[in-house]
Amino acid sequence: MNYLNLFFVFFRIGAFTFGGGYAMLPLIEREIVFVYQWLTQEEFIDIFAISQMSPGPIAINAATFVGYRFSGILGALFATFGVVLPSFFLVTNLAKVIQRNKNSLYLKGIFAGIRPAVIGLISAACLSMFRISVVDYKGVIIAILIFSIFVRTKIHPIILILSSGLLGIVIYL
Amino acid sequence: MNYYVKLFLIFLKVGSFTIGGGYAMIPVIQREVVSNNKLIDSDEFLDIIAVSQSLPGAIAVNSAIFIGYKLAGLLGSIVTLLGIIIPSLVVIITVAVFYNEIKEQRAVQAFFQGVRPAIVALIAATAFKLASSIPKKYINLLLIISSFISISLFDIHPIIVIIACALIGLIFNREENSSELS
């Protein structure tokens, strides 16, 4: 019963938050901390710290962490599948509709307008991430260095991410 | 190699290096799916980001499901979904067990302090690469700048910006098509 409860709480969170993982955090806080009291406020704040030092989408990280704290590995699985299942149904069905109407002039027009907007969207996300992630001049140097290497060479982004982490250890430790 | 295994491994990589929110997966997906393996083109990738942002749920998860479905149907989307969530599950459970020990590690903090500015730089550079696939017209430049300003400066929700640009695209394309016909 508890597992089902956990599943449905995260299913609801996954189904009703627009705007990505960060937008889910207030909803998770309300359900998990205030309504069900599965975590304390301090533990909830730890989720931020943990998400920042772990790979993976924040929504998944938060669901896994809450589920694990609540009832171990099985809890982590139930919460995680709960949060991604609404995405799974919605995205696969919409993808089907889009593929069937690939040649529709309406759809072509819509996407012709949306593509430039996505560039604006990514740039805006970049700016707000810059404000949080680049805290000193060393950060600015890392950003400029990685940007120029990535634009001029074919080095894989994963190699650059790992090297910047090592660089972080060298200059910040 | 089996196509499903290949897709799974690509998204396992994407999931392992999405550090600091959904947009962080953009550079790795662009490199792995768009430029190295040429499974989808830049335009399609931009469409997928727009749809993923407009639906409820995490952007990285939605994009993974969409790309999997587009390339290999329902089974493809299950495979890419598992690829993107397995790194989180493994790392978070490990971190949850050893949280107090890890929190105190200065080296771990320094590592991520170095990684965060790099992620921002990679996303910015990828945005440039993706922008090059958009036709060079004034209307497109105007849409890029105005959507950037409405989100960054006026704090308008991205979904509203996407819907507005979709309507503008619909109207402009119709005019272009009707003028081509006459």
Image: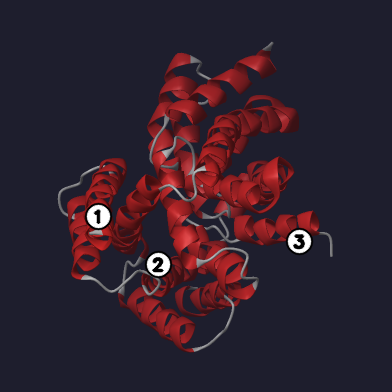
Chain letter of disc 1 in the image: B
Residue shown at 25% from the left, 45% from the top: B167
The verdict on a common chain for dots 2 and 3 is yes
Q: Amino acid at mark 3?
A: Lys
- Percent position (x, y) of residue B110? 50, 68
Asked whether B176 or A163 is in front, the reply is B176
Numbered disc 1: secondary structure: helix
Left or right side of A156 for B83: right
Q: Which residue is mark 3?
A: B6
Q: Can residue B90 be seen here?
A: no
Chain letter of disc 2 in the image: B
* Label whose residue precedes the other's in the sequence (1 or 3): 3
Chain letter of disc 3 in the image: B
Q: Amino acid at mark 1?
A: Ser
The residue positioned farthest toward the right in the image shown: B1
Q: Which residue is mark 1?
A: B178
CB atoms of marks 1 and 2 within 8 Å: no
Numbered disc 3: secondary structure: helix
